[in-house]
């Protein structure tokens, strides 16, 4: 028989929120020393915790305990009557989110709970712990069965409503994708996310979905989280205006997209466009504000022909490589210098845009409306870039998503009415809620387009992917490496999807009929993988993010096992 329910929930909130927002009750203060303190039912205990401290509490009989952390990531350890380590737990998404943990005690003796900081150099923080209730053995047995029942209910619902994918590879028939026509019937803009920037199967299935959406559902624009200016050359390739696909792919500047899988997608689009009328062709566009050298080159050429008196002064400040001033991996001192340089450049870029805007009649007369419009947009994106990265880090990240959403909207406003688009970006950008950090691009698209925008988040259980090493031996040569993830931890969104036993599938979360258990799962925070352009071995728990999945995505695409995307030969610093 089960004898003890032990429930630990790790919670956190954003810095700067008032303390009373986190703690619903006025708790007493725990002593700073590490002697054990008995937890009394209904009497929360709050304490500050510093690096090196260990706070201990006594637990006895059948109890429900909640731990709330704020500003510090803690490790919770439970020791039995003989001082054996019963379990150790830390939330898989760092210092955020909920993680209920069930514990089966062997006796009703006194147990010791120990709380300490996870990181050796962590800043002091605060937590609250409280004994929620005393449970009888009979009550515990009933409650202990509920989490398992609810888990199985969610897993069963996911499996029942899944759209299994027979393959992730493009070039096959679309029989298994036909149910998507009903799901996406009224969707004009579909966001395809990714949990990493380096997963081969994510790229392959996006290629397959693009073929389906173009051929079967009349989507005509493919927008990617890539350079606004540099994607023009890729579009020239897929529309037959230039023939060097390798040069076109190199021009976009990001290793993330310079892969065999993306090249295969480009080649398919090029071939498809030769087989249809001009109004049916698919075009590739970028909406990101980074990597602007192609736009700068075109602006200099334009100024040399139209207003040569502006050429020398513009060329002078264009010489500063903006991308060299955008590195989250630099030291604090380097960051300070880069921020100051960007703020000085901001004045010059704003002046260039103002000149183009104020002199539009003359510039159009000397060139053409279409060319002028394009140059003004290149200048606008340069101004966005400098504005975003001259701000403090968190504000700059937020500004980038504002600008990406605005650039996408401006691109679509120039398309014929009713044009449908596929949007490719990281899960963190296509999402429709802020997950506690900042409003992502997808949230703005939801504001712009309402339910006509559909966010499809991508998840995986285990396998390999590529990313730049976060802690390189040589910072000047940060290697692009393969990393491997273990199976998703229990309770994570990725784990639930894996428990269906299905290899690859899509599930709609928006319109599918739901019950109370699935609604609770959709509205309760849970960890989900989120891996960007850098990674480090041994830190997998830090690459989870607490999300409310029903608010974040309209649907999920799951791949059980993944492999590394395949970089093209031109990509530098690749660990093969």
Image: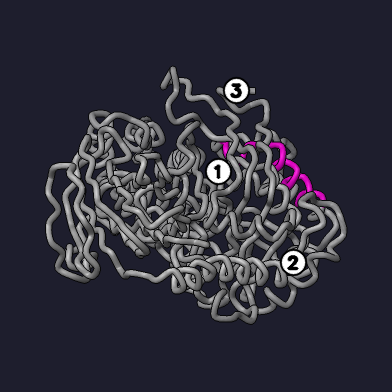
141 or 574, which is in the foreground?
141
Q: Which residue, given by chain and number where applicable, does mark 2 sit on? A: 163
The prevailing secondary structure element of the residues shown in magenta is helix
Which residues, given as a range, are shown in magenta?
A: 255-271
x%, y% of residue 565? 66, 37
Q: Residues within 10 Å of mark 3 (few under 14, many from 20)?
A: few
257 or 412, which is in the foreground?
257
The C terminus sits in image quarter: top right
Verify CB contact (< 8 Å) between mark 2 and mark 1: no
Q: CA distance from mark 1 to mark 3?
A: 26 Å
x%, y% of residue 526? 47, 60
Q: CA distance from mark 3 to mark 2?
A: 36 Å
Q: Is residue 219 rendered to the left or right of residue 175?
A: left
Q: Residues within 10 Å of mark 2 (few under 14, many from 20)?
A: many
Q: Which residue, given by chain and number where applicable, does mark 3 sit on? A: 575
Q: Which mark is residue 49?
A: none
Quarter of image, res 389: top left
Mark earlier in primary sequence (1, 3) = 1
| Residue shown at 36% from the left, 50% from the top | 397
281 or 449, which is in the foreground?
449
Q: Against 383, is 296 above or below?
A: above
Residue 393 part of the magenta segment: no
């Amino acid at each position: 028989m089960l004898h003890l329910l032990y429930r630990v929930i790790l919670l956190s909130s954003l810095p700067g929120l008032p303390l009373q927002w986190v703690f619903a009750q006025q708790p007493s203060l725990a002593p700073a020393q590490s002697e054990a303190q008995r937890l009394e039912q209904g009497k929360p205990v709050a304490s500050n915790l510093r690096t090196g401290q260990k706070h201990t509490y006594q637990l006895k009989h059948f109890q429900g305990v909640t731990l709330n952390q704020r500003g510090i990531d803690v490790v919770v350890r439970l020791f039995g009557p003989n001082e054996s380590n019963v379990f150790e737990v830390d939330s898989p998404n760092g210092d955020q989110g909920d993680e209920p943990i069930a514990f089966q005690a062997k006796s009703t003796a006194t147990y010791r709970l120990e709380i300490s900081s996870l990181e050796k150099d962590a800043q002091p923080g605060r937590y609250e712990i409280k004994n929620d209730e005393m449970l009888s053995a009979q009550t515990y047995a009933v409650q202990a069965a509920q989490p398992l029942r609810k888990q199985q209910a969610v897993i069963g619902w996911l499996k029942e409503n899944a759209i299994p994918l027979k393959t992730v590879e493009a070039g096959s028939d679309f029989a298994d994708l036909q149910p998507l026509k009903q799901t996406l019937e009224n969707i004009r803009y579909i966001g395809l996310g990714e949990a990493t920037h380096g997963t081969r199967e994510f790229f392959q299935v996006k290629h397959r979905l693009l073929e389906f959406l173009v051929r079967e559902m009349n989507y005509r624009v493919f927008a990617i989280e890539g350079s606004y200016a540099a994607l023009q050359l890729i579009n020239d390739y897929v529309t037959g205006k230039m023939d060097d696909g390798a040069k076109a792919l190199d021009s976009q500047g990001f290793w993330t997209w310079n892969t065999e899988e993306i090249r295969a997608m480009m080649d398919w689009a090029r071939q498809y466009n030769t087989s249809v009328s001009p109004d049916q062709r698919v075009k590739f566009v970028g909406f990101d504000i980074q990597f602007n050298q192609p736009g700068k080159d075109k602006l200099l050429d334009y100024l040399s022909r139209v207003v040569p008196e502006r050429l020398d002064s513009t060329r002078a400040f264009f010489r500063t490589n903006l991308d060299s001033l955008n590195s989250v991996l630099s030291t604090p001192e380097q960051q300070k210098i880069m921020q100051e340089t960007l703020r000085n450049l901001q004045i010059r870029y704003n002046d260039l845009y103002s000149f183009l805007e104020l002199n539009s009649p003359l510039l159009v007369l000397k060139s053409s409306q279409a060319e002028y419009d394009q140059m003004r947009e290149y200048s606008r994106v340069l101004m966005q870039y400098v504005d975003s990265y001259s701000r403090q880090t968190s504000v700059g990240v937020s500004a980038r998503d504002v600008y990406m959403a605005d650039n996408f909207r401006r691109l679509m406003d120039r398309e014929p009415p009713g044009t449908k688009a596929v949007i490719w970006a990281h899960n963190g950008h296509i999402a429709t809620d802020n997950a506690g950090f900042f409003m992502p691009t997808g949230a703005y698209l939801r504001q712009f387009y309402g339910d006509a925008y559909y966010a499809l988040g991508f998840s995986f259980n285990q396998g390999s992917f590529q990313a730049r090493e976060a802690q390189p031996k040589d910072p000047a040569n940060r290697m692009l490496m393969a990393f491997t993830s273990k199976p998703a931890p229990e309770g994570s969104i990725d784990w639930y999807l894996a428990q269906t036993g299905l290899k690859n599938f899509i599930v709609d979360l928006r319109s599918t009929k739901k019950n109370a258990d699935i609604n609770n799962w959709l509205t309760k925070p849970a960890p989900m993988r989120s891996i960007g352009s850098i990674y480090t071995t041994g830190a997998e728990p830090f690459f989870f993010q607490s999300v409310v999945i029903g608010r974040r995505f309209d649907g999920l695409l799951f791949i059980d096992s993944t492999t590394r995307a395949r970089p093209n030969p031109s990509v530098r610093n690749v660990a093969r």
